Amino acid sequence: MPYTPYHFGPSGFIGLVFRKWIDVPVFVLANVIVDIEVLLWDKWPVHRYVHTLLFGAAAGAVWGIAAYLLRHYFERVMRLIHIPYKACFWKMVISGVLGIWLHIAIDAIYHPDVRLFWPTWARPLWRLLSERQVEAVCLAFWFLALATYAIIAASYIKQNKARKTGAESD
Ligand SMILES: [Zn+2]
């Protein structure tokens, strides 16, 4: 799915800024996982079950639970990329749901076949912005996400250093 990388911008930025309440890796990866569905269909519509609020929520919750079982890997990776992180079950479940909802809300503006409010065909978001505008907004969020990440990682490294020198002088 060629559009998936666009989702890293908004999900990365929102996840990082609200990381106190949102599990960053679960939230961001939910935005990627949801597009596996698109690869399953070779006929239109390619956005079917998981691209609805209802099934999307179920899939997001399942993803959050699965991620909780893998929490030690998440904690290790987050340490490696210098983001303060603590796995928490409910935070992960809710972040899985919100991650998929963010993704499909963006898709609902862009793709005509997304039935956000299934079983109805209501498409209130469709073409709220043009395709070009959606892409531009996503790209802008990419830069904001990178800047936010740089700030978080820098302070994480600084704090770690302070803690180490503090431990040495004790
Ligand atoms: Zn999608």
Image (spheres, rainbow, N blue to C red):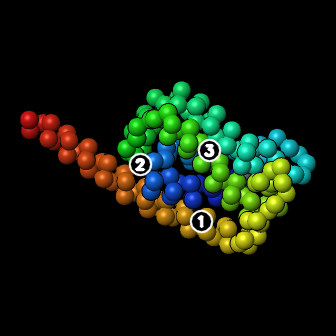
In the image, taking residue 29 as reference, residue 3 lies left or right, namely: right
Q: Residues within 10 Å of mark 2 (few under 14, many from 20)?
A: few
Numbered badge on residue 139: 1
Position of residue 93 measured from the top left corner of the image (x, y, whole percent): 56, 38
Q: Is residue 119 above or below residue 139?
A: above
Mark 1 belongs to which amino acid? Leu
Question: Which mark sits nearer the N-terminus, 1 or 3?
Answer: 3
User: Which residue is pictured at 40% across the width and 41% down the height?
Assistant: 85
Label 2 sits on residue: 20
Question: Which mark sits nearer the N-terminus, 1 or 2?
Answer: 2
Whether residue 1 is visible, yes or no, is no
SS label for mark 1: helix
Numbered badge on residue 97: 3
User: Which residue is pictured at 62% across the width and 44% down the height?
Assistant: 97
Which of labels 1 and 3 is toward the front? 3
User: Which residue is pictured at 37% across the width and 54% down the height?
Assistant: 152
Gap between marks 1 and 3 measured at Cα: 23 Å
User: Which residue is pictured at 50% across the width and 52% down the height?
Assistant: 15
**Residue nearer the viewer, 108 or 2:** 108
SS label for mark 2: loop
